[in-house]
Amino acid sequence: MTSERAPAAPLTHPIRVEVIRQRGTEVTVRAESQQFAAIARLLGLASLESLEARYLLSRNGDRVKLEGRIAARLHQTCVVTLDPFPVQLNVPVKLDFAPETEAEAASRRAERDDAEIDIEVLLNEDDPPEPIVDGVMDLGGITLEFLALALDPYPRKPGVNFEAPAGDAGAESPFAALAKLKRSD
């Protein structure tokens, strides 16, 4: 019997909560050049040239607040021309973390509140905290997650516009043919 494991993440940077100082701990997460191809493949990029995140972590008991920025230079593929083009990103990141049991309880409360409120949208409500699993947070995974969210899902090379192909001028639309059938009745 073979056990299948999930593939290892291309960027990991685990940090234990107890090493975070209350006044703040600065942490830099940087992808090495040998990780670029795997990260680019994971995120559907043409290439990745640099990826660095700088975070300030501050602790209050078992809870952690993370604030920082992710800077990346990469190439995405244009959806119109299929040519790769350069992109520079500077993404702000702000998250709260809590021990796993506390984060799960907050998530359940949020789900219960969502079930009670049918249509109302709460704009200024905080998201529930992210879980701290076994006293560890993976800043590499957080970096990749926020980078993925910042990517344009339909990237276009600057200056490129999509133009629908010119159809046969003599061809009639299917709706026009249906209208003719309806009139002939």
Image (tube, rainbow, N blue to C red):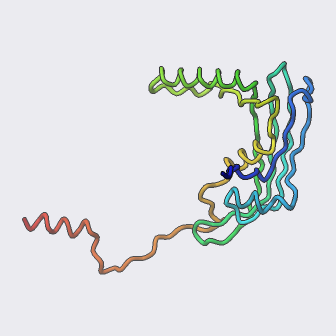
Q: Residue at x 34, y 79 (%)?
A: 169
Q: In screen coordinates, is 82 left or right of 185?
A: right
Counting the numbered discs, the total is 0
Of residues 104 and 117, the one drawn nearer to the viewer in this rendering: 104
Q: In screen coordinates, is 136 left or right of 174?
A: right
Q: Position of residue 178 (x, y in %)?
A: 20, 66
Q: In screen coordinates, is 70 left or right of 111?
A: right
Q: Position of residue 54 (x, y in %)?
A: 86, 42
Residue 177, quarter of picture:
bottom left
> Where 58 falls versus 159 (above or below)?
above
Of residues 87 and 139, the one drawn nearer to the viewer in this rendering: 139
Q: Residue at x 90, y 39 (%)?
A: 27
Q: Position of residue 69 (x, y in %)?
A: 81, 43
**Residue with the most extreme left position:** 185
Q: Residue at x 11, y 65 (%)?
A: 183
- The quadrant of the rendering that contains the C terminus is bottom left
> Where 42 falls versus 15 (above or below)?
below
Q: Position of residue 175 (x, y in %)?
A: 25, 65
Q: In screen coordinates, is 92 left or right of 165?
A: right
